[in-house]
């Protein structure tokens, strides 16, 4: 019986309705679900990719946990680093502890100047950071100069292997006040981390050069702790407090980037709800099209009833009609959405080349390319919502179909 009901449902959908408007709404219902599902998948994939890429870029530079002394530097830091890395309880979480000297400066070159963030790091830490870079061009050894971001390099109009002047406010105290430090550095390498904020303002130098430049002897400004799993901060922090004294301040990456994380989460949720409206509109079209199909096929329904078909079978026919529209619309929407998500960056570049419009400005979005991550659980959620709403949309029309009086319907259509 089920096969017969599906066959009749398919025939009703394929047959030309007496009112062409009914057929138009049926097509619009299918297209609405297809577009709605595809749009939801693309937008959620891009938002997830943007979120993940941004976090990975940030965690690629900064530690998962940062230790510092408010208003002071960390002197005699090497024993503390060794203690943290060898502690019996902590070593299962800590991958490495990196001494960092970080400060602000001003770079001057070719009559241009720019504010920069200077990070003094070890050679090993710099190599680890550059492993996640999009590209790196090396001119000299790291300890012989400075490494600067590609955006900063282009802005300062520097030729390869030229010097760059950097100013720091942390100079020596004189009778005339504190004098700034002015020093020339060779450019040892240029890098692109794929994040505009870093590529336009970040300058790396060796720990030794940073100590001399900032006038810090055998001290660092902070210790960056990298964990095997960034999500283990809640397990590692209580163990840290048992080792370090109260003079240290401890911050994790979630605290430092809390505003950004909350903004991204809210934006993703709001976008999902807004785009879900497209599917809801398509679902209302299913209600309208099936309701009008019930009226259009009243005579056929009456004939089926007189031939002995029960009310439950009539309900299932219109249920199958609605679900056929929903299932095929959802399938096509899912295929289109996944395809666009996978190739979203080449599509963006193609459209940008044709229209000559910058669709993803790195200065605004902070990333050099449009990322997208297709998640199976998100697709399952979108498909489930689409099919559930579509099923609910069939309930009213199926109820209307069972209220048809066979004799009256046949008489009205003669």
Image: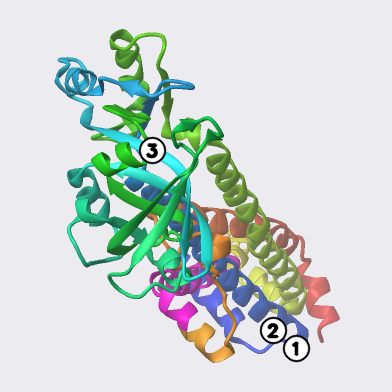
Task: Tell me, yes or no, whether the two marked residues, 2 and 3, touch with CB atoms within 8 Å.
Answer: no
- Can residue 337 be seen here? yes
Q: Quick one: SS at disc 3?
A: loop
Q: Residue at x 66, y 68 (%)?
A: 305
In this rendering, the answer to whether 248 lies above or below 353 is: above
Q: Is residue 52 left or right of residue 302?
A: left
Q: Is 254 in front, or is 162?
A: 162
The magenta span reads 322-349
x%, y% of residue 33? 59, 69
x%, y% of residue 74? 34, 22
Mark sitting earlier along the chain (3/1): 1
Q: Residue at x 21, y 55 (%)?
A: 144
x%, y% of residue 245? 35, 9
Q: CA distance from mark 3 to mark 1?
A: 79 Å
Q: Which mark is residue 214?
A: 3
Q: Which mark is residue 23?
A: 2
- Can residue 4 be seen here? no
Q: How many marks?
A: 3
Q: CA distance from mark 2 to mark 1?
A: 5 Å
Q: Which residue is mark 1?
A: 20
Q: Is 272 in front, or is 277?
A: 272
Q: CA distance from mark 2 to mark 3?
A: 75 Å
Answer whether residue 210 is magenta in the image: no
Q: Is 361 in front, or is 219?
A: 219
In this rendering, the answer to whether 5 lies above or below 49 is: below
Q: Nearer the viewer, mark 2 or mark 3?
A: 3
Task: Tell me, yes or no, whether the two marked residues, 2 and 1, touch with CB atoms within 8 Å.
Answer: yes
Locate residue 189: give its quadrant.
bottom left
Q: Quick one: SS at disc 1?
A: helix
Give the crowd class for mark 2: few <14, some 14-19, many >=20 residues within 10 Å.
some
């Amino acid at each position: 019986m089920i096969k017969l009901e599906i066959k009749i449902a398919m025939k009703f959908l394929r047959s030309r309705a007496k009112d062409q408007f009914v057929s138009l709404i049926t097509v619009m219902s299918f297209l609405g679900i297809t577009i709605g599902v595809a749009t939801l998948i693309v937008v959620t994939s891009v938002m997830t990719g943007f979120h993940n890429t941004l976090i990975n870029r940030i965690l690629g530079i900064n530690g998962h946990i940062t230790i510092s002394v408010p208003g002071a530097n960390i002197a005699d830091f090497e024993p503390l680093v060794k203690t943290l890395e060898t502690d019996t309880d902590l070593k299962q979480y800590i991958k490495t502890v990196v001494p960092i000297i970080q400060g602000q400066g001003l770079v001057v070159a070719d009559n241009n100047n720019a504010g920069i963030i200077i990070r003094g790091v070890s050679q090993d830490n710099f190599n680890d950071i550059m492993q996640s870079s999009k590209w790196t061009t090396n001119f000299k050894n790291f300890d012989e100069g400075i490494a600067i971001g590609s955006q900063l390099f282009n802005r300062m109009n520097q030729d390869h292997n030229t010097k760059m002047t950097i100013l720091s406010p942390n100079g020596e105290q004189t009778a005339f006040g504190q004098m700034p430090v002015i020093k020339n550095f060779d450019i040892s390498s240029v890098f692109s981390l794929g994040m505009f904020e870093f590529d336009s303002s970040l300058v790396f130098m060796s720990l030794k050069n940073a100590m001399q430049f900032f006038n810090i002897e055998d001290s660092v400004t902070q210790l960056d702790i990298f964990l095997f799993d960034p999500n283990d901060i809640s397990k590692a922090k209580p163990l840290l407090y048992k080792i370090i004294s109260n003079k240290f301040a401890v911050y994790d990456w979630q605290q430092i980037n809390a505003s950004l994380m909350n903004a991204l989460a809210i934006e993703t949720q709001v976008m999902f709800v807004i785009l879900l409206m497209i599917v809801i509109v398509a679902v209302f079209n299913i209600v309208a099209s099936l309701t009008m199909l019930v009226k259009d096929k009243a005579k056929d329904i009456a004939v089926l009833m007189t031939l002995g078909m029960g009310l439950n079978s009539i309900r299932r026919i219109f249920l199958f009609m609605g679900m056929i529209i929903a299932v095929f619309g959802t399938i096509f929407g899912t295929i289109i959405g996944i395809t666009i998500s996978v190739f979203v960056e080449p599509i963006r570049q193609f459209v940008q080349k044709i229209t000559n419009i910058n669709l993803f400005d790195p200065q605004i979005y902070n990333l050099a390319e449009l990322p997208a991550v297709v998640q199976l659980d998100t697709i399952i959620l979108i498909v489930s919502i689409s099919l559930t709403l579509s099923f609910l949309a069939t309930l009213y029309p199926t109820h209307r179909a069972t209220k048809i009086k066979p004799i009256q319907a046949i008489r009205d259509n003669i």
